[in-house]
Image (cartoon, rainbow, N blue to C red):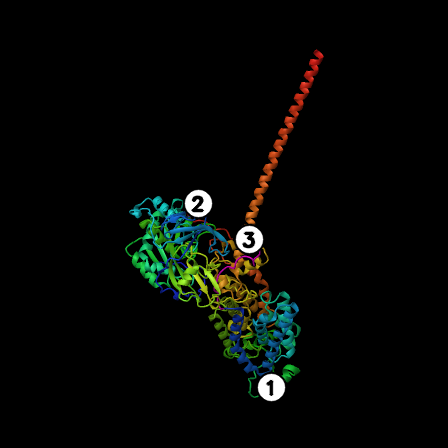
Amino acid sequence: MSIASITRSGPFTHTANSVQKTMLTVLLALVPATAFNAYLFGWPGILLFAVTVGSCVAVEAGCLALAGQPMKAALSDYSAVLTGWLLAMSLPPWAPWWTGVLGAVFAIALAKHTFGGIGQNLFNPAMVARVALLVSFPVVMTAWVMPHPLFSAGAPGFSDAVAITFGGNLPDSVSAASALGYVKTELSRGIPVTQSMAHVPDLMDMALGFRAGSMGETSAILILAGGLFLMARRIISWHIPLGMMGALFLMGTLFHALDPARYTDGMFHLMSGATFLGAFFIATDYVTSPVSKHGQLVFGIGVGLLTWTIRTYAGYPEGVAFAVLLMNSLTPIIDQYTRPRAFGRSRKGEPLPLEGKP
Amino acid sequence: MKLFPIRGGIHPDYRKEQTSEKAIVALPLPELLYIPLQQHIGAPAEALVQAGDLVRKGQLIARSQGGISAPQHAPTSGRITAVADIPAPHPSGLPQPTIILEPDGREVWTDLPEPIADPLNADPQTIRERVAQSGIVGMGGAAFPSAVKLDLGTRYKLEILLLNGAECEPYLTCDDRVMREHADEVIDGARIMAHTLGVKKIVIAIEQNKPQALAAMSSAASTFSEVEVVGVPVQYPMGSERHLVQAITGRETPAKKLTADIGVVVHNVATARAVHQAVRFGRPLLGRVVTVSGGAVREPNNIEAPIGARVADLVAFCGGFSGAPASLVNGGPMMGQPLPGLEVPVVKGMSGILALTAGEVNEQPVSACIRCGTCVTICPCGLVPVEMAAFIRKDNFEVAARLGVMDCVSCGSCSWVCPSHIPLVHYFNYAKGMINALERERRKNERVKTLAEAHNARMEKLEIAAEAKRAAVAARKANLAAATAEEKTNA
């Protein structure tokens, strides 16, 4: 007897949902933030985005070909597009083309296909790529620029953009620090947070996205809108985003209250860096996060705590990518300890006792 | 009444509107009726007729065998043409012993047993015997002999008879129509069953998407203070026995126990109506209401069909197919089974015949699991389908069992929601079969071992005895020889 030989079981009706539809919905949710950031960072960002997404699809096709797997079905699930998209959003917008290509190799070939392809990887591919690029090419990966909205004065035209993205001609004058990096550097020079905060964009500008940062992560409001859309479509639930942002906010608020000169406040943690993108689009990656709601809450809180810890104490100002990867490694254990209680059984799996019944 | 939440569940497209406004219509007598001897859980009935016999409507044609079994009666008068192996509505499509009856169209009744006078004060044993001899089995789909379930009061301390009118499966409206059109009969049957079980309280649970059934049943129940009609949330699988009990009482049936262990017995509404007819009029179970529906059926309907009418007869009565169905289902689309063909007969547990179009089935190619966790969120049994499936894929049944695969009620919710369209229930049914087979194998091996040990011990004993005997013979011979020698010496 084999599984194929027994008669087909029900159900004889299925939801119209599919992996492809799920991925497309996530892509749709990313569109507003991406479009706005394309406008903010102009042609170099758009070129890098195209290179990154294209490379991810190409690497995916290459890996499938090497593995001798059918290509059409796997490519049309849009998972490689999504990985490329998220990777592009986490790169400095004016980074050179090869960061996208190399990132695609890290993400798709290394993080995804060495584990067996879709659904099998332990670590979030886009974050593996981002972190691998960050530790390998720290200068390129922290060369932030202030927004140069399309068609505004000083914004690079298309040919300038080609020179920036494909020629590596990053103009020195435009580089800027991210808010997190700036505060961290100042702190290391002995300047208290309270003072350096005067030089970072105000919260409203940060929420809207008018700040230096990765290509798609700066507009908290548009990412939030995409996240809420995903929640409304029941693609994601509140557990991971709220767990992560809640833990981060609480840690920030608590420590800021204890020592405002040393610790940035909770709102700053929420609005800066990749917090929103991480909370709604990165940490919520199905494959690498726990399957149960309890597990997802634990996971989210873990990402939030680690993000705060890394941002506050570690060498890198930016913590979301590292935090997500660290928690990814705990996912199997979290899954094991957060299994739901089976009907009619105790948490330990023993049948429930009959209460006062013969 | 205060209701309690049940875990998980899904909201599939209910598609009941195709038949919910179709009043029950009787199927004209077909040319032949095919009455399988096995229409229930337990031992098959034993045929009492043979080819050529003339039978009357309601006549016993096959008697029950053993404690868990049910008899069969002639659904109409006519001539037995054969007792032969015919495919029954089992997914295997394997032939089963079946009585074939050619109706004479005269509907001549046999002498029915007398109605039980004042059943609400009758001896429970009398009613149980009547239900047993009337061939009544659970009509919600499981087809468990009802008399056995009416006997639970003797062994358990029962409080509530819960009548299941949830009908949570998409498409099916047969219970809905029975409740709307025969509310008084259902309530009467329920009161008789409650008396038999020795319980004081009856709760009738109906999903809120059947407002007319709720109204009809409430009105029929209004004069009886012990009967309560409750609208339960529309949430599949609300009709699952254990989940319904939890929704109504808040009590969770422990694993490996029966709902009777926590004081509740559940019967289907159509079963209650059948009990009413058996007790009040002496009528055995001769037919049932079947919902014939699905996008591929020209005129979906609720049909009162005699047991043994072929599915083809019912489909023809509904105007046939409007297009080739992608799937033929016996029962509801969630927990039903594939119908092996149109030639199989209607049996007592058959609630629906569905001919579904490809669009309704929405079968899509299986893709890899992306661990979305939806199956975990919706599992009404609190299981982790994604994990169990991963182990079953590796034929690791031991871990699958530890993860609770045997607790799975096969409701199909996980398969329904899976965006990768992985046939999870298929996996679990396979694993359950394998685990049961392995367990049987283990028991068999143990038994063989015990037998072998006993055999060896016996052989050893025999050997020792034989040895002793040989020794005794040798000794006697020696004695004899000695005696002879002595004699010779003396002589």
Percent of width and height locating residue B30: 39, 58
Q: Are marks 1 and 3 on the same chain?
A: no
Percent of width and height locating residue B219: 29, 59
Q: In this orientation, which residue lies closer to the viewer: B28 or B246?
A: B28
Q: Foreground mark, 1 or 3?
A: 3
Residue under numbered circle 1: A158
Report if residue A5 lies within the magenta region. yes
Which SS class for mark 3? Answer: helix
Q: Answer few, some or many: residues within 10 Å of disc 3's Cα (few below 14, many 20 plus, some between 14 and 19).
A: some
Q: Distance between the Cα atoms at labels 2 and 1?
A: 87 Å
Which tag, 3 or 2, sits closer to the chain's start?
2
Q: Which chain contains the residue that carries disc 3? A: B
Q: In this orientation, which residue lies closer to the viewer: A281 or A221?
A: A281
> Which mark, by number, is residue B434?
3
Q: Which residues are magenta?
A: A1-16
Occupied quadrant, residue A87 = bottom right
Residue at 29%, 54% (x, y): give it. Answer: B225
Q: In this orientation, which residue lies closer to the viewer: B26 or A110?
A: B26
Residue under numbered circle 2: B65
Q: Answer few, some or many: residues within 10 Å of disc 1's Cα (few below 14, many 20 plus, some between 14 and 19).
A: some
Callout 3, which amino acid? Met
Q: Is residue B236 above or below residue B78?
A: below
Callout 1, which amino acid? Phe
Callout 2, which amino acid? Gln
Numbered label tally:
3
> Which mark, by number, is residue B171?
none
Q: In this orientation, which residue lies closer to the viewer: A155 or B241?
A: B241
Q: Distance between the Cα atoms at labels 3 and 2?
A: 29 Å
Q: Dominant secondary structure of the magenta stretch? A: loop
Q: Distance between the Cα atoms at labels 1 and 3?
A: 65 Å
Q: Foreground mark, 3 or 2?
A: 2
Q: Which chain contains the residue that carries disc 2? A: B
